[in-house]
Amino acid sequence: MAFSKNFLWGGAVAAHQFEGGWQAGGKGVSIADVMTAGANGVPREITDGVIPGKNYPNHEAIDFYDRYKDDVKLFAELGLKCFRTSIAWSRIFPQGDEALPNEAGLAFYDKLFDELLKYHIQPVITLSHFEMPYHLVKAYGGWRNRKLIDFFTHYAEVVFKRYKDKVTYWMTFNEINNQTSGMNDWSLFTNSGLQIQPGENAELLMYRASHHELVASALAVQIGHRINPNFMIGSMFSTGPVYPASPDPKDTMKAQRLMQANCWYADVQCKGKYPAWLKHYFAVKNYDIGITLADEDILKAGTVDYIGFSYYASHVVKAAADEPADYMTPGRDIEVKNPTLSRSDWGWEIDPIGLRVTLNWFSQRFDLPLFIVENGLGAFDRLDGDRIHDGYRIDYLKKHIEQMALAVNEDGVDLLGYTPWGIIDLVSAGTGQMDKRYGLIYVDKNDAGKGSLKRLKKDSFYWYQNLIRHNGNQLTENTFKTHP
Ligand code: P53
């Protein structure tokens, strides 16, 4: 027996990537609403407000907003025990800085959570998943501004109170660490609403914004526990091991530094304090982050209940010939291909054992349960009549679940659940594409935004249904052949 009977088999999405209805029920413009569609290797454009005539894929997405009843029925047929999505902050506070929430937005999530609970599917909810109200960027400069802490905690308090009897599992910020490793315009904007002006220090602003989010997150944990002591409020990190390219110790040092740069948020959210190396780095760089004594107390009192994380790929790094001895904040330019792994069509290295490495990495450092809240394969799918034979996706999921089972059985990792990403096809966060598909449920819509939006079950749907039915114990059989 690999998994406990309470193991949370589920699926994951985010509001902006699948709901659509970008102006429905009084919703305000979010930062996802001003990002155009990109392509494989072509970044999305962040426009100055919504410009007529541009293609904004999140505006309609897959129109879950109007189809939620039918879609939840499909999730129930799949057998999901939980469903991870986010609340679109801009449905609740359209501008972000209002005193009173938007009732129509709150009512939408009441209906959605009731529908899920009707089928005994637990909602697992992220408060902020790359979709803050755009007004907070324009009027306040995003998370560089300390005022955002008040706006966010007010929002958190409102939804915690409203859904206190419907939701147990929460996460504060999706992939809060995504901005450190990326340090490009896209990741700074999506995570923190940062738009860097000429002459500004992007790194300093990123650390300040991150600090404000960490304080807001810790306050939210405390507020949530006061409202319902049974709440499980977690963190959410983007993960993946970083391997040294060779036995050269300089490469190991480099890999270690990159892991530190990616994972220091875990020290803050799980242990309640900044790691020594980072405090040292702030001092060396003369960075004034604005960390007060009161902030330090808040961080200590607001540590998370579990560690949620996404896992897609691992990375390999090589030290540059002229690597400086301090190895500080290494960039991605020293990343090399892993000769032992294959890659997705988008160049993401496929590394199931890396998931086991990651589970052990967290388990050894923090005494907290883990929750894999994203994992999956973005791939092109081809229709064969009304079938989609996505054996490659089944293969990806199966190999990752096998490693997950080893981590639980052999390594004693405390794992709460597994929610593969994009359980239903949705808009890619990175590229804005529809054709980068993760779903076990196909949605008829392409990169140009054309299609009937009809839903079809892929082979992987039947495979996962079977796996959940057997609580993960039927991995070796080619069960997807049971397609009716
Ligand atoms: P897409 C980069 C690296 C790792 C995870 O990503 C990432 C990203 C952002 O692209 O994001 C997470 O859609 C994120 C989801 C996102 C998913 O991974 O670019 O939490 O919103 O859709 C997959 O293929």
Image (spheres, rainbow, N blue to C red):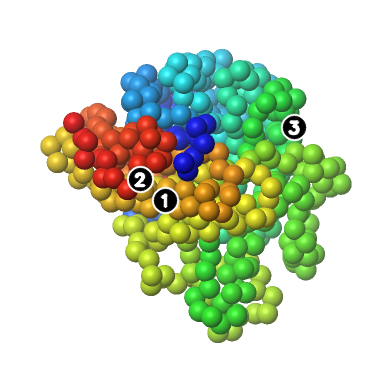
Which residue ends up furthest to the bottom in the rendered image?
321
Q: Which residue in the protein does label 3 denote?
A: 222
- The residue drawn where x is 45% and y is 16% is 118
Q: Residue furthest front?
A: 1
Q: Amino acid at mark 1?
A: Glu
159 horizontally vs 107: left or right: right
The image quadrant of residue 426 is: top left
Which sits earlier in the primary sequence, circle 1 or circle 2?
A: 1
Asked if residue 380 lies left or right of residue 29, the reply is: left
Residue at image location 36% in from the left, 38% down from the top: 467
Residue type of the residue flagged with mark 2? Leu
**Element at label 3:** helix
Under mark 3, the amino acid is: Gln
Q: Quadrant of residue 429?
A: top left
Instruction: Indicate if the residue with disc 3 has its beta carbon within 8 Å of ligand 1.
Output: no
Q: Residue tagged by mark 1?
A: 402
Mark 3 is surrounded, within 10 Å at the Cα level, by few (under 14), some (14 to 19) or many (20 or more) other residues, namely some
Secondary structure of the residue carrying tag 2 is loop
Marks 2 and 3: CB-CB under 8 Å? Answer: no
Judging depth in this view, the residue of 469 and 54 nearest the camera is 469
Measuring from the top left, give residue 244's x and y in whole percent. Answer: 53, 73
Label 2 beta carbon less than 8 Å to ligand 1: no
Q: Nearer the viewer, mark 1 or mark 3?
A: 1
